[in-house]
Amino acid sequence: MANIRDVAKHAGVSVSTVSNVLNGRTDQMRAETLTRIQQSMQTLNYFPNRVAQQLKTGQAKMIGLLVPSIVNPSFAALAREVDLAAKERQYRVLIGNTYRQIEEEAAFLDDMFSHGVRGVIVAACDIEKPHFARAVEQGMVMVNYDGRMPVRAQADNFSLDSVSMDNIAAGRMAAEHLIAQGCRRLAFATVAGMTPSRAHKIEGFLCAVKEQGIYRDGMIVEGQAMAAYGDTEMTELGRALALKISQQPTLPDGIVAINDALGIGLMTGLHQAGITIPQQISLVGIDNISLSGLIFPGLTSIMPPLKTMAEVMVDRLIMRIDNPSIPPAEFLFPPSLVSRQSVRSPEA
């Protein structure tokens, strides 16, 4: 079985140079040297001893990603980008589906500690729950994804980074696009069970309609999920909400969906009710999952810069694992509009 010395000899480099590759210290290395070492590792069928590395350093070259449910396309897209960013930096990702259950979240954090993982991205969860605070106190480096910096962060020394799309801006952008295209009877379709990011999207939507003087009661249309927050059933919730909307005395002419999965279900349900998109109702989603560009009509959506956000999260974890004295920071990214066929033109 080949060892690190065999790889160094085969590649014509020192053992310390190979060690730098194994530990991700390649920023000052020539590209051809890195390629030669990687090819030598493949040729010799060399696999580094991860257990030995962990015993030596006290931590594994892995990070955790905690999501409510990988079934939700938004979290699946996030997992892909985090995994790609981590692999570029020679890290692996352990994913936990917790369904927003306290016991599952706490167990996942315990598992991370037992595996030597010292950095976790927590996606769309209530970061102020006690088990997250305990994990930070015990040395876990944490990034809060899709949520703002907790109010208590400074007062309680709750040290974690926050990375999010500006959800208020996203809700506002979706409403303003519909208004600019001539829509005046707007609605916001969502699921009962409020999270901070959902509340911020609704806040942005309401700010836009109030500024235009078109606010009315009943603009927020909620569907009741079978499980808390509805993370695994967004498409079916959209279909159910379509029936509810289609039975209103006066139809809205523009709808913002809390996310694309719910928006796609809404589109399907409205079509089954004999309502055409965008001729009768224009529709905008939020998060721009890949499926939104494949359906017909294509779903206009508000897009987060997910690749950049994932890279920032992974980099921050690695930096703060290596140097715990780096202060936490908040990163708020602007959304952008992806225009497709689900919104009518003003001329139409």
Image (cartoon, helix red, strand yellow):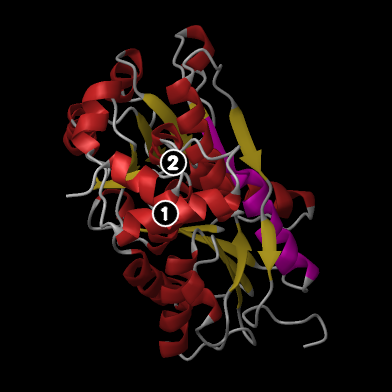
The numbered disc on residue 175 is none
Q: Is residue 109 above or below residue 312?
A: above
**Which quadrant of the view contains residue 113?**
top left
Residue 169 image offset from top left, x and y in percent: 68, 48
**Which quadrant of the view contains residue 288?**
bottom right
SS label for mark 2? helix
Q: Residue at x 30, y 45 (%)?
A: 6
**Which quadrant of the view contains residue 112?**
top left
Q: Residue at x 57, y 54 (%)?
A: 32
Q: Is residue 248 above or below residue 196?
A: below
Residue 137 image offset from top left, x and y in percent: 33, 13
Which quarter of the rendering shows the C terminus?
Answer: bottom right
Mark 1 or mark 2, earlier in chain = 2
Amino acid type of the residue tagged 1 in the rendering = Gln
Instruction: Say few, some or many: other residues with alpha carbon within 10 Å of mark 1 (under 14 / 14 to 19 / 20 or more).
Output: some
Q: Residue at x 63, y 71 (%)?
A: 254
From the image, tell me which residue sits under label 2: 21
Amino acid type of the residue tagged 2 in the rendering = Val
C-beta proximity under 8 Å, tags 1 and 2: yes
Q: Is residue 345 above or below residue 166?
A: below
The boundaries of the magenta stretch are 162-180
From the image, tell me which residue sits under label 1: 38
